[in-house]
Image (cartoon, rainbow, N blue to C red):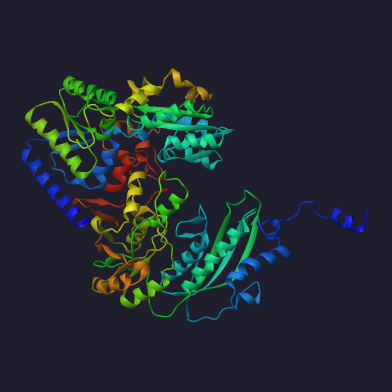
């Protein structure tokens, strides 16, 4: 049964690729915003099957990669404190800070734990009332509702020893930043399907209008990705702009209202520093005044942090879609997943790691 | 003060609970050590060689070619669905020896135990070691016990060393993969890794996945009988199938090309991996074997494996091909693309979304 489905999939992909080639009249540069999509393109081998006319520009949609160096350094400083249990999603542990990373803190005796959700961190806080438990709350709109719930529950249950180091980022402001840059090459976008499942599609219409660009809400399976490209190319070839939903089974135009309310309850918009890109106005969320007591940046004294980036790493240019990982002189030599110079080589959703693991050349 | 009281006065005021937990004295080499060895280890492992009670074991060689392997076992948790650290300690070393084609015969075991370790857990571990040793037809012929202070070890560590005999003129090793050979796996990938993660309660959801941990020596002997020219045999433990095949590709200077649709993965394991961002190709196995063997021996090998309880889901998963650039493992994906399958770098980390 499975084999039949799978063979069918390869046939469907073949047909879609033929259809795509059929409508292409010239080269197009399309950005997949989301690191999960970059990963899926490489993992399934789809990127290499696309017609030569399609250039994929890998977007900054990897929360691990864009978490600012300053926040990574703050995480390292907080995690090294006595009496702190520092909890994080696994792939943040290897992200290089200026001097150190969370793995090194753990090796030196710090209590750094991998958790699978912020609620697990909250449970650790309840079980260890004498310790301060900090969760590294990173992510886009997708993880924001669950991170928000952890502080909402902490307040409901009057848990005082829990806090969150927040590094939330939002997709639409990043698209504005990319499209308004002088050296922008992006002609069409694959918007991240799961982000739209939470937030809906409304935020994307003004972007399509302002920059006269097609945007396709796209899923993560090989056929979803190919359909996203097909819809985008159709609009590009016809010279139309707008937002098309090619991930109808998960995304409604309104998004998930309940999740949006939860986000609104705990967070407020703020300017956010993106690693490798710089400050993007209103591109982040931080805990609002009602939940400020759970803000680890306010709870712990971790000022006077002097950040220092690797001089060789070009992850900033890669995150902006200006360069490809294999155009970096350090790629695969000085910089590998074992010894990452930048965050894009760490996360499995980082473009450099995806190139290294699945493509290399 | 009468004499009876005086005796009590000079005795250690803290009674040592000899039956409930392992205490520091159990590693002292004195009476307590002897009690522990008698009540737990001899009780379970006893055999004529061990029963001689020496600090050494004298063994008779059954062949000119002797194969040995050693392995330290540190697993958390020590009990998990499908097995425990004891079974792991026996099966792990039995399997290492078996991968040469040799027949494992003897094991030694060294225990490092944290003070306070429950005696009943130790007995359970010894019991499962012996059950596995009986299944694998090996004798545990020598051992050692050390007890360390609380916090200086995590519950219990077990190191085992094995000896096996290679009677035939087999030359199975990682450098022998030949262009045109088939790559066969004896069953589903990743069961052990996911079972252990689930037992740590780290998944946030429950599964009924059991570790595949088992001694492979009996199945391997039937495999060798069915496919006498097997070129490479290896158990894809830590780092999983991807890492093991990368090692073989490098050693043999070949490319190994996998077919994604043929890879056997249990549905629950696949689902757990999808949620956590793991790839079953990198998840540890403890009861699987990878065979690289000439194409014409594949039908008889598959038949023999599938007839064995540990090999029911055996499958051909790829081919050995000529090196194009540098030795690597590639995969033809289910949609017809091709990608590199790299070694695991560092620890496998669950990704954020």
Outermost right residue: B1
Residue B55 image-quadrant placement: bottom right
Residue A95 image-quadrant placement: top left
Q: Point out the image quarter for the C terminus of chain B.
A: top left
Residue A122 visible in rendering: yes
Residue A24 image-quadrant placement: top left
* Residue at screen point 40% across, 80% down: B168
Q: Which of A345 and A20 is in front in this view?
A: A20
Residue A101 visible in rendering: no
Task: Examine the rendered structure and indicate whether residue B140 appears above or below residue A89.
Answer: below
Q: Where is residue B157 in the image (x, y as percent from the top left)?
A: 56, 57
Task: Examine the rendered structure and indicate whether residue B165 appears above or below residue A146.
Answer: below
* Residue at screen point 39% across, 38% down: A341
Q: Where is residue B234 in the image (x, y as percent from the top left)?
A: 38, 65
Q: Where is residue A112 in the image (x, y as percent from the top left)?
A: 50, 39
Number of marks in the rendered image = 0
Drawn side of residue A289 relative to residue A313, left or right: right
Q: Where is residue B156 in the image (x, y as percent from the top left)?
A: 58, 56
Outermost top residue: A289
* Residue at screen point 19% across, 46% down: A48
Task: Examine the rendered structure and indicate whether residue A89 appears above or below residue B158.
Answer: above
Task: Examine the rendered structure and indicate whether residue B135 appears above or below residue A277.
Answer: below
Q: Which of B113 and A291 is in front in this view?
A: A291
């Amino acid at each position: 049964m499975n084999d039949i489905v799978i063979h069918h999939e390869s046939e469907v992909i073949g047909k879609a690729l033929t259809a795509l080639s059929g409508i292409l009249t010239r080269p197009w540069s399309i950005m997949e915003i989301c690191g999960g999509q970059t990963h899926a393109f490489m993992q399934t081998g789809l990127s290499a099957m696309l017609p030569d006319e399609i250039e994929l520009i890998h977007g900054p949609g990897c929360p691990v990669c864009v978490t600012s160096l300053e926040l990574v350094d703050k995480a390292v400083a907080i995690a090294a404190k006595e009496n702190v249990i520092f909890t994080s999603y696994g792939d943040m542990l290897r992200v290089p800070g200026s001097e150190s990373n969370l793995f090194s803190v753990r090796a030196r005796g710090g209590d750094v734990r991998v958790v699978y959700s912020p609620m697990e961190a909250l449970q650790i806080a309840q079980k260890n009332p004498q310790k301060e438990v900090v969760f590294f709350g990173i992510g886009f709109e997708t993880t924001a509702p669950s991170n928000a719930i952890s502080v909402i529950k902490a307040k409901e249950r009057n848990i005082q020893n829990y806090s969150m180091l927040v590094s939330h980022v939002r997709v639409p402001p990043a698209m504005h930043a990319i499209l308004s840059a002088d050296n922008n090459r992006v002609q069409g976008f694959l918007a991240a399907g799961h982000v739209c499942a939470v937030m809906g599609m409304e935020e994307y219409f003004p972007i399509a209008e302002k920059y006269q660009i097609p945007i396709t809400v796209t899923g993560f399976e090989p056929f979803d990705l190919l359909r996203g490209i097909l819809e985008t190319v159709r609009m590009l070839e016809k010279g139309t702009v707008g937002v098309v939903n090619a991930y109808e089974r998960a995304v409604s135009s309104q998004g998930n209202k309940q999740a949006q309310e939860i986000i609104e309850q705990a967070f407020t918009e703020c300017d956010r520093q993106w690693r490798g890109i710089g400050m993007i106005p209103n591109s982040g969320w931080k805990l609002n005044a009602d939940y400020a007591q759970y803000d680890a940046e306010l709870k712990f004294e971790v000022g006077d942090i002097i950040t220092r980036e690797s001089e060789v790493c070009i992850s900033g240019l890669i995150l902006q879609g200006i360069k490809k990982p294999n155009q970096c002189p350090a790629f695969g030599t000085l910089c590998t997943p074992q010894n990452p110079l930048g965050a894009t080589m760490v996360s499995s959703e980082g473009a450099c790691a995806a190139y290294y693991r699945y493509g290399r050349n | 003060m009468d004499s009876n009281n005086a005796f009590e006065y000079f005795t250690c005021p803290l009674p040592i609970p000899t039956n409930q937990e392992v205490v520091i004295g159990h590693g002292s080499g004195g009476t307590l050590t002897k009690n522990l060895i008698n009540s737990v280890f001899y009780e379970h492992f006893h055999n004529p060689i061990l029963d001689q009670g020496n600090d050494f074991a004298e063994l008779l060689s059954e062949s000119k070619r002797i194969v040995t392997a050693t392995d330290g076992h540190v697993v958390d948790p020590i009990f998990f669905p499908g097995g425990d650290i004891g079974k792991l300690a026996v099966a792990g070393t039995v399997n290492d020896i078996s991968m040469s084609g040799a027949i494992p015969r003897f094991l030694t075991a060294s225990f490092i135990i944290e003070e306070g370790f429950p005696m009943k857990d130790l007995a359970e571990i010894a019991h499962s070691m012996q059950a596995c040793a009986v299944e694998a037809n090996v004798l545990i012929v020598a051992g050692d016990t050390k007890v360390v202070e609380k916090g200086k070890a995590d519950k219990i560590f077990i190191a085992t060393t094995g000896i096996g005999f290679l009677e035939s003129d087999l030359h199975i090793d990682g450098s022998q993969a030949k262009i045109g050979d088939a790559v066969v796996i004896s069953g589903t990938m990743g069961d052990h890794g996911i079972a252990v993660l689930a037992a740590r309660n780290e998944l946030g959801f429950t599964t009924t996945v059991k570790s595949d941990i088992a001694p492979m020596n009996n199945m391997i002997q039937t495999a060798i009988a069915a496919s006498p020219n097997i070129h490479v045999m290896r158990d894809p433990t830590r780092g999983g199938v991807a890492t093991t095949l990368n090692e073989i590709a490098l050693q043999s200077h070949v490319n190994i090309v996998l077919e994604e649709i043929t890879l056997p993965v249990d549905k629950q394991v696949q689902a757990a991996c999808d949620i956590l961002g793991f790839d079953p190709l990198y998840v540890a196995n403890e009861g699987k074997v990878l065979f690289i063997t000439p194409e014409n021996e594949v039908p008889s090998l598959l038949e023999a494996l599938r007839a064995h309880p540990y090999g029911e889901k055996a499958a051909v998963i790829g081919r050995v091909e000529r090196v194009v650039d540098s030795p690597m493992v590639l995969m033809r994906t289910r949609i017809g693309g091709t990608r590199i399958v790299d070694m695991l770098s560092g620890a496998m980390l669950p990704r954020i979304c």
